[in-house]
Image (tube, grey):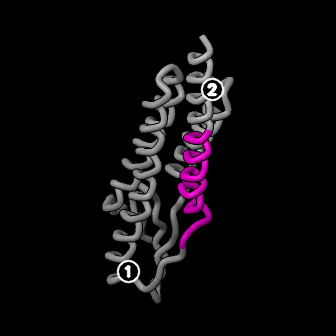
Amino acid sequence: MIQRIQAVYLLIVAIFMVLMMSFSVGHFYTETSVSDMTNLAVIAPDGTMNYAPWALFAILMVVAILSLVTIFLYRKRMLQIRLTLFSSIILVGYYVTLAAFVWGTLKECGSFTPSWTLCLPLISIILNWLAIRAIGKDEMLVKAYERLR
């Protein structure tokens, strides 16, 4: 399972998604206050929590679980490719959902400053692409061996 490079890529994607769920996404600034935004809630300076961005957390949870499940489907390489591609599409959807949420919240707040953790889904998309390439190479290798028999 973990002997192949694509399993390492998918494991790193799952780890990045857990890190992304744990850390802050950014901060909303107004003239008088700073609100912290996580993937689960927007935390106001007085400590109240608005759970409006819960969809971001759900998307990251789906991608993390999907990446872990995909590692164990090493005998079904074409399904592995499809699930990894689906995971990348979901990560693009994460950015779209984040942009829609930030755009909607910016009407009420002054400005938004992103955190460094927003690069993790992009890195995960790249790792998914590398995993798809490695799985495809394995599939070609297996087909070449079957042709020789």
Q: In what quadrant of the picture does the C terminus appear? A: top right
Q: Is residue 105 magenta?
A: no
Q: Amino acid at mark 1?
A: Leu
Image location of residue 130, percent across then percent down:
62, 45
Q: Amino acid at mark 2?
A: Leu
Circle 1 sits on which residue? 106
- Find residue 54 and report its horizontal and vertical position in percent: 34, 54
Sort mark 2 into few (<14), some (14-19) or many (20+) by Cα contacts within 10 Å: few
Q: Secondary structure at mark 2?
A: helix
- Is 5 displayed left or right of 51 in the figure? right
- Dot 2 or dot 1, earlier in sequence: 1
The answer to whether residue 84 shows anywhere in this view is yes
Residue that numbered label 2 is attached to: 141
What residue sits 58% from the left and 30% below the top?
Answer: 140
Residue occupying the point 59% across, 41% down? 133
Please determine whether, in this image, residue 108 is positioned above or below residue 6: below
Residue 139 position in % (x across, y down): 56, 28
Question: Over which residues does the magenta segment extend?
Answer: 114-133
